[in-house]
Amino acid sequence: MKTIKIGIMPQKEIRERTLAIARGEYTPRSDEPKIWFTSIRSLAEVLSDDNQALLQIIMEKKPNSIRELSELSGRQSSNLSRTLKMLSAYGFIKLEKINKTVCPIAKASQFNVIFGINKNKNLTKIHK
């Protein structure tokens, strides 16, 4: 299973970076994170202990439906569905529709988090 790289930088810098990419002024390197958070706290909310346990169940048990995952995890389907959509939006899982059933699939088993106290010039410098 692959490792997902996660970057943390202030919203303003994420916006500047995104706009520079859109204008063609900056091309991200292949080793840069594809997923960005504005703080360690926001990352911790998404990859909370409960959500990490959920990812572990998805990786190990490979449930064939959200209902099966609900039974395995003890979480209610409505709450679980919202969590899975959020994890999918960040690219941590894939929600694959097979016939009329949605099957959660883990996309990574490890995460590398990249951030610095000072502005990380390697990640945010815009090359002209």
Image (spheres, rainbow, N blue to C red):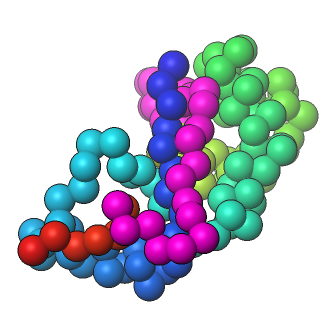
One can see residue 1 in this view: yes
| Vertical comparison of 96 with 92: above or below | above
Residue 127 pos. (x, y %) = 16, 70
Please identify the quarter of the rendering in which residue 18 is found: bottom left
Please identify the quarter of the rendering in which residue 57 is found: top right
Residue 21 magenta-highlighted: no
Magenta region: 93-122
**Residue 76 placement, left or right of 6:** right
**Residue 122 placement, left or right of 50:** left
Please identify the quarter of the rendering in which residue 42 is found: bottom right
Residue 7 pos. (x, y %) = 50, 57
Q: 64 or 43, which is in the foreground?
A: 43
Residue 14 pos. (x, y %) = 41, 74
| Vertical comparison of 58 with 5: above or below | above
- For image coordinates 74% across by 57% down, the residue present is 44
Q: 98 or 119, which is in the foreground?
A: 119
- For image coordinates 69% across by 32% down, the residue present is 55
The residue furthest bottom is 12
One can see residue 85 in this view: no
**Residue 89 placement, left or right of 85:** left
Our reading of the magenta stretch's main secondary structure is strand
Q: 21 or 92, which is in the foreground?
A: 21
Q: Quadrant of the C terminus?
A: bottom left
Residue 19 pos. (x, y %) = 24, 78
